[in-house]
Amino acid sequence: MEYSEAHIIQNILTGKTILYEYFLDKYGQQVFNLIVRIVSSQEDAEELTQDTFLKAFQHLSSFKAESNFSTWIYRIAYNTAISATRKKKYDIFAMDEVLLANISDEQVDFILNDDNEQSMGELNRAIDKLEVDEKALITLFYLEEKSVNEIALILGITESNTKVKLHRIRKKLYLLIKQEE
């Protein structure tokens, strides 16, 4: 018999802490994937993934089932990874607003939907040059296939702001790929 996540949480809160393994098994890899995209270091991502699940466990009693557990854990992971990156210095790639405005969606779709091996490599190198919050948004949308609504909840922004940022990041990726050619 399969139990709901809310039921599992209630059991954990009453002392059956071994049940927390369910969340580690179900969301561990996805949380790691998000964090590694943000921090770009396997070792740091492993440590931050552990930190994320520890924080979630410590604050499990404050989880309100208003959203899915996955949304809640992603928000903790995002905040944990962003906090860690603020402690390190990263090169920020500045983008010209006029340049972005002159790129059509068709150009972006053409270059981002090319799934040959070389293009995928160029795309991954371009993603690595994004700012940490941009990496998180792209990862949540394309790799984790989260909805715009879920991403907005995870990042703590509006749905319309999420759409605008996604649109801009896609154009930025296009420019980064073109710059590499």
Image (cartoon, rainbow, N blue to C red):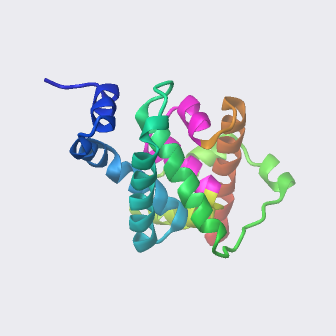
- Span colored in magenta: 133-154
- Image quadrant containing the N terminus: top left
Q: Is residue 116 visible?
A: no
Q: Is residue 143 magenta?
A: yes
Residue placed most toward the observer, 179 or 161: 161
Please state the horizontal and vertical placement of residue 95, each as a whole percent of the image.
Answer: 78, 61
In the picture, the quarter occupied by the C terminus is bottom right
Relative to 118, is 15 above or below?
Answer: above
- Residue 113, compared with residue 63, is above or below; it is below
Q: Is residue 4 magenta?
A: no
Q: In this rendering, would 156 be left or right of 99?
A: left
Q: Is residue 143 left or right of residue 149?
A: left
In the picture, measured across the screen, residue 53 lies left or right of residue 155, that is left
From the viewer's side, name the closer residue of 59 and 169: 59
Image coords of residue 122 (percent x, y): 52, 65
Q: Position of residue 69 (x, y in %)?
A: 42, 35
Q: Is residue 105 visible?
A: yes
Kindly identify the residue that appears in the image at 61 percent across and 67 percent down. 85
Our reading of the magenta stretch's main secondary structure is helix
